[in-house]
Image (tube, grey):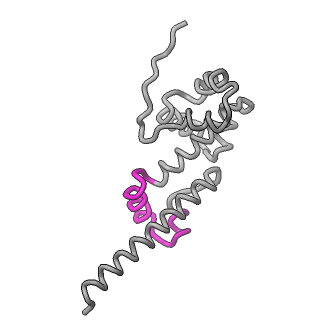
Amino acid sequence: MCHPAWGRALTAAQRLNDLARLRRVRDRIDREYAQPLDVEALARGVHISAGHLSRQFRLAYGESPYSYLMTRRIERAMALLRRGDLSVTEVCFAVGCSSLGTFSTRFTELVGMPPSAYQRQAAGAAAGMPSCVAKQVTRPVRNREAPVIEPQLA
């Protein structure tokens, strides 16, 4: 039989190992957001099951790996839309989304308006603002917390 302290040490070591794996997954998503990524591929990359990765990632970061990936993609899309030289469809594919409908739905959930409306609004709003400031000011809100924006009647 193992000594109880040995079991606690092993459990603590396992937790640290799991956290290191989760950080590697998060870092990979941050680096490769525009690549075709899915939970199964991310889990294979750190040698754990997709279900275990999803559960542990949600416990550590408060959202699923897919949700985190989509947030990264939407953040990048916001920057590209602010630039104004690409269409919404081009931006969708540039950030790694393969479905314009899914991209538009997720963008609207996180930002509070469709990508085309964001692009029109951002054209004037970020003018003259340094890109690092614009990125902070316009960062999307996670987990469907975007404020509801009432349409402006002109």
> For the magenta stretch, what is the residue range?
41-64
The residue at the point 36 percent across, 75 percent down is 12
Does residue 8 appear to the left or right of 96 in the view shown? left
The correct choice, above or below, for 87 with respect to 1 in the image is above
Let me know if residue 140 is in the magenta part.
Answer: no
Foreground pick, 1 / 6: 6
Give the residue furthest to the right.
85
- Classified by dominant secondary structure, the portion drawn in magenta counts as helix
- Disc tally is 0
Does residue 20 appear to the left or right of 73 in the view shown? left
The residue at the point 51 percent across, 32 percent down is 111
Give the residue furthest to the top.
154
The correct choice, above or below, for 10 with respect to 69 in the image is below
Let me know if residue 52 is in the magenta part.
Answer: yes
The residue at the point 43 percent across, 25 percent down is 148
- The image quadrant of residue 37 is bottom right
Task: Estimate the x, y position of residue 82 in percent, counting from the top left.
Answer: 66, 31
Task: Estimate the x, y position of residue 34 in percent, counting from the top left.
Answer: 64, 50
User: Where does the C terminus fall, quadrant-wise?
Assistant: top right
Foreground pick, 121 / 13: 13
The correct choice, above or below, for 141 with respect to 12 in the image is above
Foreground pick, 83 / 45: 83
Task: Estimate the x, y position of residue 9 in percent, counting from the top left.
Answer: 34, 80
Does residue 136 appear to the left or right of 10 in the view shown? right
User: Where does the N terminus fall, quadrant-wise?
Assistant: bottom left
- The image quadrant of residue 75 is top right
The residue at the point 64 percent across, 44 percent down is 95
